[in-house]
Image (spheres, rainbow, N blue to C red):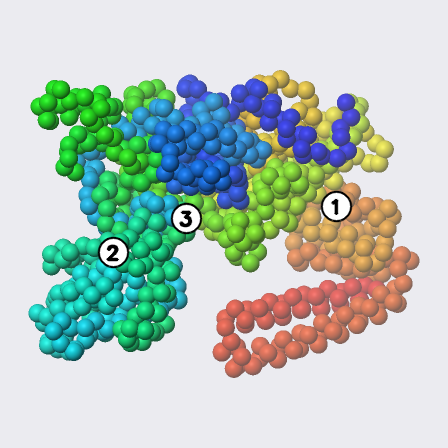
Amino acid sequence: MAIASQYNAKRVEDKWYDYWMKNKYFHSEVDEREPYTIVIPPPNVTGVLHMGHMLNNTIQDVLVRRARLKGYNACWVPGTDHASIATEAKVVAKLKDEGIDKSTLSREEFLQHAWDWTHKHGGIILQQLKKLGASCDWDRTKFTMDEKMSESVIKVFVDLYEKGLVYRGYRMVNWDPQAKTTLSDEEVNYEERNGRLFYLKYKIEGSDDSLTIATTRPETILGDTAICINPNDERFTHLKGKKAIVPICNRVIPIIEDEYVDMEFGTGCLKVTPAHDENDKNLGDKHNLDVIDIFNDDATLNSYGLHYEGKDRFQVRAEIVEELEISGFLEKVEDHLNKVGTSERTGAVIEPKLSDQWFLKMKEMADPALKAVVGDDINLVPDKFLNTYKHWMENVRDWNISRQLWWGHQIPAYYYGERKNDFVVAETPEEALEKARKITGNDALQASDLTQDKDVLDTWFSSWLWPISVFNGILEPENREIQYYYPTNDLVTAPEILFFWVARMIMAGYEYRGEKPFKNVYLTGIVRDKQRRKMSKSLGNSPDPIGLIEQYGADGVRVGMLLSSPAGNDLMFDEDLCKQGSAFSNKIWNAFRLVKGWEISEDVEQPETARIAIDWYTSKFQKSLREIEDHYSKYRISDALMATYKLIWDDYCSWFLEMVKPGYGEPIDSKTYNAIIEILENNLKILHPFMPFVTEEIWHEITERSPEEALIVAKWPEQKDFDENIIKEFSHAAEVIAGIRKIRKDKNISFKNEIGLSILNNENVSERFDSTIAKMGNIADLEYVDGSVDGALSFRVRSNEYFIPVTGAIDVEAEKKKIEEELAYTEGFLNSVNKKLSNERFVNNAPEKVVAIEKAKKADAEAKIEALKSSLKNLN
């Protein structure tokens, strides 16, 4: 069958992905081979593919495809995360569009809507990953709300509670008023914003005196329960023991003393609002102050807000400032730069809030996870993130694991009495009832008397178990799959979830398996545009990944993503890189078509040029293979791609095929052809992890193969000894050929016309590639000489000189004039460089790099002058 003249990525990609799926190449079962395991960072179930996913999953696919070729039992476990906050927000928005308010639904009714949404949208991102070529074991696809996954989460919660690591506490938490739930400290982003500092006057009870405080949040004065001064501040000695009156609400509050107050900030007086600031809460506890919460869950003001009740906090800020000014309580306003906490999930400004929540003690669990990374049991790549990891783990705080949502794993705490501590924690309602009866001594207690905690667990509380739970290692810790596949090998993820997810998985690994969950953590960079902006929908600077695949093919996009994405460094994405990747696909395809178009003869003897070319490329391949393997071992994936790219584009397509190509209209000998095919197959093997589709297509076009012989399960090339000398010798020969071609081009000497070449071999270079030079330069006579050749143009390769006779082929006088002009210019340039280098002030004061550049210019000019003089001499 004729080979298509053009490579059709869409046809090829659909065909081979279906073929791989049909033959279950992605599927893994426990066997005698050494496993290679990757678990996917589970994307949000309602998400769609973005550029970060593209980068992350391309890298994972490269690693797993290479492992498969190297004979490992490769297992890449895919799945999705239920994403409590994001999914619930989407479902609430959908219901709102349908005229339904969440508050009018029962929990069961809402969850049915959430499951309907999940079933409708949940598989989109996984289907998109297939378009990318991701070779996940789709039979193992997991969802964090699957039955066994959910059971694992509940079992761990109960276990940690019984160990005393999970507790319920009334504490200041980060409240997201848009999602109406708490967030952990790690889910709060702090950003500097230009705000204002308001100076407010509080009257002193029983006098005409007043004091002034400075605040960035004037609306919170309605929750003030004290004014605090530093006992060492002599300015306020007269206020000790007195009381102040809060403006607008006229609440009388004590003036307390505490060294916590910074005498230098603001006025030196601090308003204390225990319900809305963690430090104020600590002061409140110390001085036994009242706690007045002025906000509803959506950050509107409640009844303590008086006539502002029901209004948003920021609206109240503007209005209360106006009222304070009219009433004479506003002294002045200053610009002020302060850090504002925002929700990592919704972007809403966080509101500190006192609340009963569930927490997990982290310090005890953090210690082995810290030692594992510091002690090199687990490698962070690049290791520049080690200090960040250490800082987080050494300063870890208890994890707020409860969320005020309905979508997620409902906390398995069951309340049986009126007091807030009247609860039991159990894996099932039946176990909870049994425990409650035992505690109360009331055997008449019924299941209907128990009420399960309304909150759900933080989504990360399920995903921190991911490497264990995907192999059912929590429910069945001794099962053969967890024993075989765990610990996993490589984790590929983004640095921004180093603590959210990576550190917590390490903690869970040591807590529940007594060992690390993975050996290496490859931290990718952020995908940015050419202006260094992070790609986002809001900026409109993020291309549609599926659109890119439609345009450039999956192989092209994969290459484009990886060409400039070193580990941990941001990727400056440029669509031209995908175009370059697509061009690479076409280059490989056309090179293959060239080879397949040659007529093969059993009767033709192998030419010397072909034999040497095969010897050279075989050594070059082996040298590159070592370099590629070294890059892989250091997780320099983009460098491994670049080494592969250069080997195939430059050495194979541009040099090797030209060296072995038969003469026009002539057949190629079968020995050379067979060697070319073997070389091509090795090229395809090392390229396959990066470009799986075009390589599989060519692999099967070479010859008809059975499913067992598919490229995806072929054998990675073995490392062998190679001849370093032949590589060096060819490098020299390539420069000679380039020199010949340049003279031909510059002097308009047709490549069809044979010319002579004389060599002054000052370096005693091997003659091994002389036949190659003759073939690729179309040289009729190649000879070695002892001196210059009259009537010839010359060029140098290092200290060797090469002469091409041109008498009769060019206008000698015109050429001499041209050389003389170039010589005069170059000598003038050299003089200017010499003047600069003879200037002691310049040499002594200029940066070392600048001086080195000038010296290099001098050396280049001198070499060029010598070559021009030689050419001129030969033409005289």
Residue 140 can be seen in this image: yes
Q: Are marks 3 and 2 in contact (CB under 8 Å)?
A: no
> Which label is found at residue 773?
1
Q: Is residue 515 above or below residue 429?
A: below
Q: Are marks 1 and 2 in contact (CB under 8 Å)?
A: no
Residue hosting label 2:
304
Left or right, 858 with respect to 673, comes to left
Nearer the observer, 770 or 84? 84
Q: Is residue 632 above or below residue 575?
A: above
Please provide percent x and percent y for residue 58: 53, 38
Q: Earlier in the sequence, mark 3 or mark 1?
A: 3
Report helix, strand or loop for mark 1.
helix
Q: Is residue 43 above or below residue 329?
A: above
Please provide percent x and percent y for residue 741: 77, 52
**Crowd around label 1: few <14 · some 14–19 · many ≥20 (10 Å):** many
Q: Amino acid at mark 3?
A: Thr
Nearer the observer, 661 or 576? 576
Q: Earlier in the sequence, mark 3 or mark 2?
A: 2
